[in-house]
Image (spheres, coloured by chain):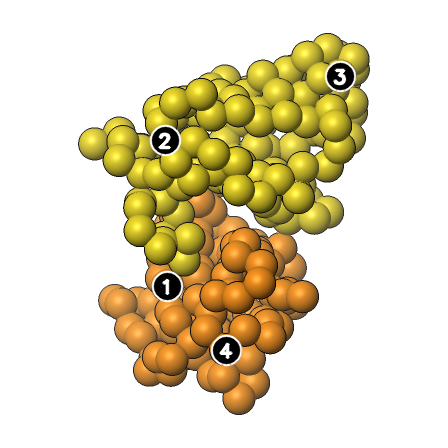
Amino acid sequence: AQKVTQAQTEISVVEKEDVTLDCVYETRDTTYYLFWYKQPPSGELVFLIRRNSFDEQNEISGRYSWNFQKSTSSFNFTITASQVVDSAVYVCALIGQGGSEKLVFGKGTKLTVNP
Amino acid sequence: DAGVIQSPRHEVTEMGQEVTLRCKPISGHDYLFWYRQTMMRGLELLIYFNNNVPIDDSGMPEDRFSAKMPNASFSTLKIQPSEPRDSAVYFCASSPPSTLIYNEQFFGPGTRLTVL
């Protein structure tokens, strides 16, 4: 069975702080894809990144960076110098190229960035 | 280009009533997904279609739920009869063709359903 765990239910930081959102996954598939989505208060899910299991390079996009470590089955997301507009629920997801080809989501981490 | 369109955005109904949620995927996308989001369970896949054909409906909670995709530009999710535990946000998503069940899924704004 595939599973995504986001242990942090809610995080609150002050603007300009760095914050890391944890994502731990379980899968038996050797090929799989990991995703992060942002869900702002308006409700829609906005795609942030997709990573396949053969690419362990970290990725940086502006203030956002992702650390993929297969050894610990983690795909963590860091926001540097957080801003109020980063306040949202962030959801990590996994899909395996194997028996069950369904996108499995974590329960999300609600990030609040205070001014 | 328009994104995924869902209607209605909000629906309040009474227990026992029929509810129909609607979705228009992005033009050219041939995968369509229906998800449900609750505080307790997070996002769950209910059913997905490829080229208008239901591929996996194992996430549909029970016979009260049904989904159809009569053509490439329209899908419905129906709950009959509705129950208070069906209260949730229902999302529709679509993704482009090829092998790309693994591709980025584009989500609609969701329908917030409240069953009293």
Residue A102 on image: x %, y %: 54, 54
Say whether mark 4 and mark 2 are on the same chain.
Answer: no
- Amino acid type, callout 1: Arg
For the residues labelled 3 and 4, the Cα–Cα distance comes to 42 Å
Of the numbered discs in the image, which one, if any, rests on residue B46?
Answer: none
Q: Tell us which disc is closer to us: 1 or 4.
A: 4
Foreground residue among B4 and A30:
A30
Q: Tell us which disc is closer to us: 1 or 2.
A: 2
Q: For mark 1, does the 10 Å Cα neighbourhood hold few (<14), some (14 to 19), or many (20 or more) residues?
A: some
The residue pinned by badge 4 equals A30
- Amino acid type, callout 2: Pro
Quadrant assignment for the C terminus of chain B: top right
Chain identifier of the residue bearing label 3 in the image? B
Residue drawn at 49 percent across, 84 percent down: A70
Q: For mark 4, does the 10 Å Cα neighbourhood hold few (<14), some (14 to 19), or many (20 or more) residues?
A: few
Residue A4 on image: x %, y %: 60, 65
Asked if marks 2 and 3 touch (Cβ < 8 Å), the reply is no
- Report the chain shown in orange: A
Q: Tell us which disc is closer to us: 1 or 3.
A: 3
